[in-house]
Amino acid sequence: MKVRMKFAKYGVMKFIGHLDTMRFFQKAVRRAEIDVKYSEGFSPHQIMSFAAPLGVGIESFGDYMDMEVNSMTSTEDMKQALNQVMVEGVEILSVTLLPDHAKNAMASVSAASYRLEMKEGRFPVDNLKDKIRDFYGQETIPYTKETKKSVIELDLKQGIYEIDADTDGAVHMLVNASSSGNIKPSIVFEKFCQFAGVDIPPSACQVTRLETYTDLSGEDEAHRFVPLAEAGKS
């Protein structure tokens, strides 16, 4: 059987990298006595995969992990068993039983939503909501991406589905998070700061992933994003 877990990672645990997060979950699964399925061969390992690696320093309330198990009593029992062995800063929010035909979490990711806020005070931008509207209203948002082998010119706007500011002064955005077109929220905010003519160091901002989505639309349809937890129910 395959299950999909939605989990949160916050507080001091936001400084734990992806590989250490994987090792933590492997140990937690053993401590919770989950009947997890192991791969075959000379070096068996638990069969699990994470939807989208989270950058160090980013909090999340919408991360996902898929896991195969040999048996289970109920998804609620599994959730409670895991939460009993979790450390402060990691919490299982839901466990969903996946149908046999479901794609794994990593292959299902299409977009993710984020909240960005100042760690102290508010963003030093007058009329923030209007500035963001003007920023997103540009025909293109050019960005130069440098890799070890090449320099790539990109249009960030193609990967920004929504961006706005709320009454508390936080910036919200929904961006492409697929393996082929992943957009980092920090890059979008950096370009916004350049547009607004302000200098806000990345260390002054707290980035939080709110949810991770898959796209259920067809080729000729508009995007129809749903959370990975809901996609796993169908």
Image (spheres, rainbow, N blue to C red):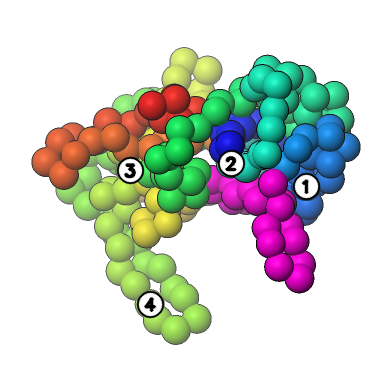
SS majority, magenta: loop
Residue 132 is situated, as x and y percent measured from the top left of the image, at: 35, 34
Residue type at mark 1? Gln
Q: Which residue is drawn at 78% across and 29% down?
A: 82
List the single residue furthest toward the bottom: 149
Front-lying residue, 144 or 162: 162
Q: Which of marks 4 and 1 is nearer the N terminus?
A: 1
Question: How much space separates mark 2 and mark 1, taking CA atoms?
Answer: 12 Å
Q: Which disc number belongs to residue 26? A: 1
Determine whether the residue tagged by mark 1 lies in a helix, strand or loop. helix
Q: Earlier in the sequence, mark 2 or mark 1?
A: 1
Residue type at mark 3? Ile
Compared to residue 171, the image places residue 178 above or below, namely: below
Question: How much space separates mark 4 and mark 2, taking CA atoms?
Answer: 35 Å
Residue 45 lies in the magenta-colored region: yes
Q: Earlier in the sequence, mark 3 or mark 2?
A: 2
Determine whether the residue tagged by mark 4 lies in a helix, strand or loop. strand
Marks 1,3: beta carbons within 8 A: no
Residue type at mark 2? Asp
Residue type at mark 4? Val
Q: Earlier in the sequence, mark 4 or mark 2?
A: 2
Residue 120 is situated, as x and y percent measured from the top left of the image, at: 68, 30
Check disc 3 and report the residue beneath it: 160
Question: How much space separates mark 3 and mark 2, taking CA atoms?
Answer: 27 Å
Query: Magenta region: which residues?
Result: 37-56
Determine whether the residue tagged by mark 3 lies in a helix, strand or loop. strand
Q: Is 188 positioned to the left or the right of 40 in the image?
A: left
Q: Earlier in the sequence, mark 1 or mark 3?
A: 1
Check disc 4 and report the residue beneath it: 151
